[in-house]
Amino acid sequence: MTEKMFGQPSTQSSCLRDKGNYRMGKLNIILMLFSLMMALLGAFADAQMNMLEEEGLRNLCQGNEKVGKLHFYVQDVLGGPNATVWEVARAEITSNSPTSFGQVRVIDDLMTAEPDSSSARLGRAQGLVTFADLENSGLAMNINFIFTAGIYNGSTLSVLGRNLMTEQNRELAVVGGTGIFRLARGYAISNTYSYDTVTSYGVLEYTLYIAYVESGFGPIASH
């Protein structure tokens, strides 16, 4: 009687282990199939995205190019606790150079619709400014205009070129952009609207003439 009592639970335990192993095996198979399905879906989604990007680029290149104009102001704060322009490097001769040759500054200026800094905010002007002329106040500009308002929100324009600060109507090249401004090209006209020597606060005026391809994001409005 004692042997039967002890032998019976052993058989039941074995059956339970077999059932547990079977369920665990099924679960592992389900998990493997699920992982495989997710991997296939991810690969398919990536392929679809690549196809959409390529198709979008073909549409851009084959579209009709149009022309737009943008006009805004940049608040250039060179001094004070809220400065948006900072020196990050200088050459050995910078301190003795009449044109600050070799000085490099990084900027993160506010872009506004009007000269007043409290007017509508359009975005930020970010990039590098290098004093690159031994004889004149000439800057090498590498600036991204980052739009954060209206239909241009999230789009950017990239501007490069030589900027002679003492001249009016300084011309820079628009070399590209993102978002609405994909494949943009054109030129920018820059002027110093005002500059306060006491507070080192300048307001710069920019007018951009841009050729672009209408891509479904919406046209560029004239201002």
Image: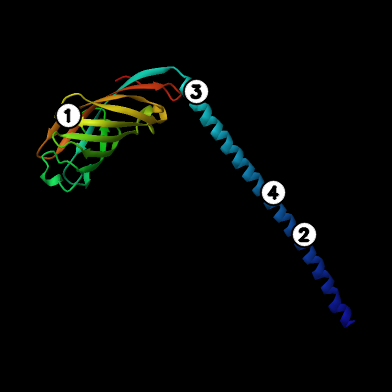
Residue located beneath label 2 in the image: 22
- Badge 1 amino acid: Thr
- Judging by the rendered image, the residue that carries numbered circle 3 is 59
Q: How is the image coloured?
A: rainbow
Q: Earlier in the sequence, mark 3 or mark 2?
A: 2
Residue 3 x, y percent position in the rendering: 88, 81
| Quarter of image, res 106 | top left
Q: Between 54 and 22, which is closer to the camera in this rendering?
A: 54
Q: Secondary structure at mark 3?
A: helix
In which quadrant is the C terminus drawn? top left
Q: Is residue 194 above or below residue 128?
A: above
Q: What residue sits right under mark 1 in the picture?
A: 192
Mark found first going from the N terminus, 1 or 3: 3
Query: Where is mark 4, residue-wise?
Result: 33
- Name the residue at the right extreme: 1
Q: Measure the alpha-carbon separation of dots 2 and 1.
A: 79 Å
Label 2 sits on what residue type?
Tyr
Can you tell which of label 4 and label 3 is closer to the viewer?
3
- Residue 118: in sight, yes or no? no
Marks 2 and 4, how far apart in space? Answer: 17 Å
Task: Tell which tag, 2 or 1, sits nearer the viewer.
Answer: 1
